[in-house]
Amino acid sequence: MLEKYAEVAGHDVVEHLRQLAEPLKGLRLVHINSTKSGGGVAEILYKMVPLMRELGIDAQWEIITGEPLFYECTKGFHNAIQGNPVNLTDSQLRSYEQTNRDYAQTGEAILRDADVVIIHDPQPAALISSFQERKGKWVWRCHIDASRPFRPIWRYLRDFVSQYDASVFSIAPFSQRLPHPVYLIAPSIDPLHEKNIDLPIEEIEGIYSRFDIDPERPMILQVSRFDRFKDPVGVIHTYRLVKRFIPHVQLVLAGGGASDDPEGEAVLQEVRTSASEDPDIHILLLPGDAHRTINVLQRASDIVLQKSLREGFGLTVTEAMWKNKPVIGGDTGGIRLQVVNHHTGFLANTPEGAALRTRYLLSNPEIMEEMGNKAKAFVRENFLVTRHLREYLTLVYALLNENQERIQLGG
Ligand code: UDP
């Protein structure tokens, strides 16, 4: 599998991973989260764990599961960490602690002997209380935006988190002050995922007839859940401003089916109202596994917008940049980390700004191509799963050599 990554990420990158992993061969590393499928964490571990194993690390992936009360509680934690005021009952908190204690017993043999334990998100965070006498280093890996947590709940969770040897957040603004080393590791995309692999040109061209898009006219795309923070109505506004100057432009808004999400449904209605009957606005409701369709749309489009008003990281930005698209993104959160203004894309604060940049790129195809190439190179360098893996390996070094001034690798 690593060889396949060498082809896309570079042989030097994979060689570097092998060198870094060499002294870690046989190291027992356990990841724990609360689901094997669904959600970004599972998606990352699904690739990360086999890659670690291929590098000779004895990596395992374990799951904590519980009764409905446990999930009610951890969902509450999730919302509270992201800033919502949440009230949790004593019985919910007791269920959380008891589920963690029970799991500590089941997993005792694996966890007691592990050299490194990486606990993902709040669900298994309380496990640490059952391992006061532990052999390995324990890390809490937070995948969510903890920049402004709801204080009462954060105080409760912080008592567990503080017991870890280190914690990891995705980007600096999401992190919290803690009494141990705090590391930053950004998310990544998998270049070998169906959503990101190269596609035959016929498949890309097939999208036009499938969705009734005119191949001869410029196409603007935003791929997003129908969520106000993604500002789909702002995207329509942007498109209309562009259309005043470039009348043949078309817009595609691709998002998931919103039937199970009452707010999603409401936002979708707002989008439909705003689009009115404009035949050049295509609102596509895609099923959750339409990875290949998203890949095709991103490749077929001329301009990719991600006009979010707030954004965690914005994997859609990374995905589009990987396809040589300079993204015009909202000036917020993780988009700022990816879109280097005027180099790999443009940051915009208003529909007017986004429209100006869209017109500029559509009128300057050579610049668009140059920026698109830079965007791809930037993702290759910074946001592929291989970089993510390298940072996990480096984190392991840092944990195991905490008190050393210098770490000697190899030789
Ligand atoms: N996505 C999808 N179908 C959709 C909308 C989004 O598969 O209808 C994917 C998208 O390609 C990306 C992820 O879901 O991989 C969204 O991640 P991002 O970080 O952009 O935003 P989030 O939805 O997590 O806020």
Image (cartoon, helix red, strand yellow):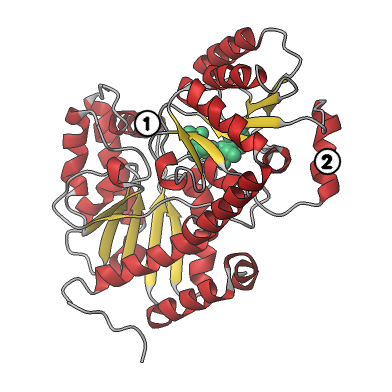
Q: Is residue 223 visible?
A: no
User: In terms of image quadrants, where is residue 357?
Assistant: top right
Q: Position of residue 111 (x, y in %)?
A: 32, 63
Q: At 70% from the left edge and 43% from the top edge, which residue is drawn?
A: 299
Q: In the figure, 22 relative to 368: above or below?
A: below
Residue 75, which numbered label? 1
309 relative to 150 in the view: left or right? right
| Discs 1/2, front | 2
Please tell me how crowded label 1 is: few (under 14), some (14-19), or many (20+) other residues with Cα within 10 Å: some
User: In terms of image quadrants, where is residue 320?
Assistant: top right
User: In terms of image quadrants, where is residue 401?
Assistant: bottom left
Q: At 61% from the left edge and 30% from the top edge, which residue is drawn?
A: 359
Q: In the figure, 208 relative to 167: above or below?
A: above
Q: At 74% from the left edge and 19% from the top edge, which residue is drawn?
A: 280
The C terminus - image quarter: bottom left
Q: Is residue 365 visible?
A: yes
Q: At 71% from the left edge and 31% from the top edge, which residue is drawn?
A: 219
